[in-house]
Amino acid sequence: AQKVTQAQTEISVVEKEDVTLDCVYETRDTTYYLFWYKQPPSGELVFLIRRNSFDEQNEISGRYSWNFQKSTSSFNFTITASQVVDSAVYFCALRDPGGFKTIFGAGTRLFVKA
Amino acid sequence: DVKVTQSSRYLVKRTGEKVFLECVQDMDHENMFWYRQDPGLGLRLIYFSYDVKMKEKGDIPEGYSVSREKKERFSLILESASTNQTSMYLCASSFGTDYSNQPQHFGDGTRLSIL
């Protein structure tokens, strides 16, 4: 069965600290897709990144970076020099090819204090 | 930018009522989804539609039905609302027939309370 685990329920940091959000997934498929979404207090989930299982390159986008490691079934998300606007709930998600179901983790709530 | 609009941000209904949640997307997306979000459980899929009048059950379809008469509109119906359906409901849409690798675009959510 597919599963996504975000073990960190809540994280609190002070502005300008770096923070890493963990995501561990389980799947029997060899091809699959991983996603990260951000849900700010307004409620709308915002797509951040998609990664397919054949692409293990790490990705950096501004202050955001993602570390995908198939060997440990992890897809971790790091925010460098965090800002108050980064405060949100972050979801990691998994989808298999041909499937319409997305398996979401329980989410990690990030508080960034000024 | 894709816009997914949910008809209400907050809704309060009574047990036993028939409740309609409406969702409209403006980007001609083929696929539309209804999720419910509960603390500690993440998002769980209720129903999915890949075309007009087509639907597939998600993980928790019991007590819900859906309607998709037009491509841009996807309605979630609580046939007889119960208190355990109090939740945040999120609508999403995505592009294309290869929906497995497409990101979903979400609405702001409807916080539904059943009294």
Image (cartoon, rainbow, N blue to C red):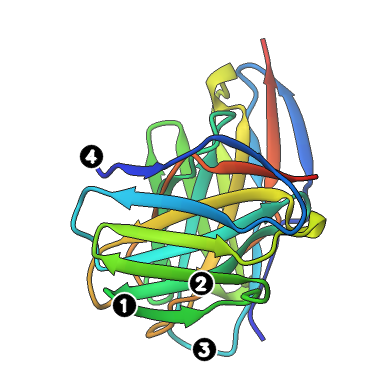
> What's the mark number on residue A29?
3
Quickly name the residue at label 1: B53
The residue positioned 68% from the left and 33% from the top of the image is A110
Q: CA distance from mark 4 to mark 2?
A: 24 Å
Q: Position of residue B75 (x, y in %)?
A: 43, 60
Q: CA distance from mark 1 to mark 3?
A: 30 Å
In the image, residue A51 sits, relative to residue B107, either above or below, namely below
> Does dot 2 land on a helix, a strand or a loop?
strand
Q: Position of residue A80 (x, y in %)?
A: 54, 30
Sequence order check, earlier mark of 4 and 1:
4
Is B101 displayed left or right of A88 in the figure?
left
The residue positioned 77% from the left and 48% from the top of the image is A8
Quickly name the residue at label 2: B47
Q: Position of residue B83 (x, y in %)?
A: 81, 54
Q: CA distance from mark 3 to mark 2?
A: 23 Å
Sequence order check, earlier mark of 2 and 1:
2
Q: Are marks 3 and 2 in contact (CB under 8 Å)?
A: no
In the image, residue A63 sits, relative to residue A53, either above or below, namely above
Quickly name the residue at label 4: B1
Q: Are marks 4 and 1 in contact (CB under 8 Å)?
A: no
* Badge 4 and badge 3 both on one subunit: no
Disc 1 marks a residue whose amino acid type is: Lys
Sequence order check, earlier mark of 4 and 2:
4
In the image, residue A18 sits, relative to residue B102, either above or below, namely above
Disc 3 marks a residue whose amino acid type is: Asp
Disc 4 marks a residue whose amino acid type is: Asp
Nearer to us in this view, B94 or B85: B85
* Number of residues whose C-alpha sits closer than 10 Å to that of mark 2, classed few (under 14), some (14–19) or many (20 or more): many
Q: Give the label, 2 or 1, closer to the camera.
A: 1
Q: Chain of mark 2?
A: B
Q: Chain of mark 4?
A: B
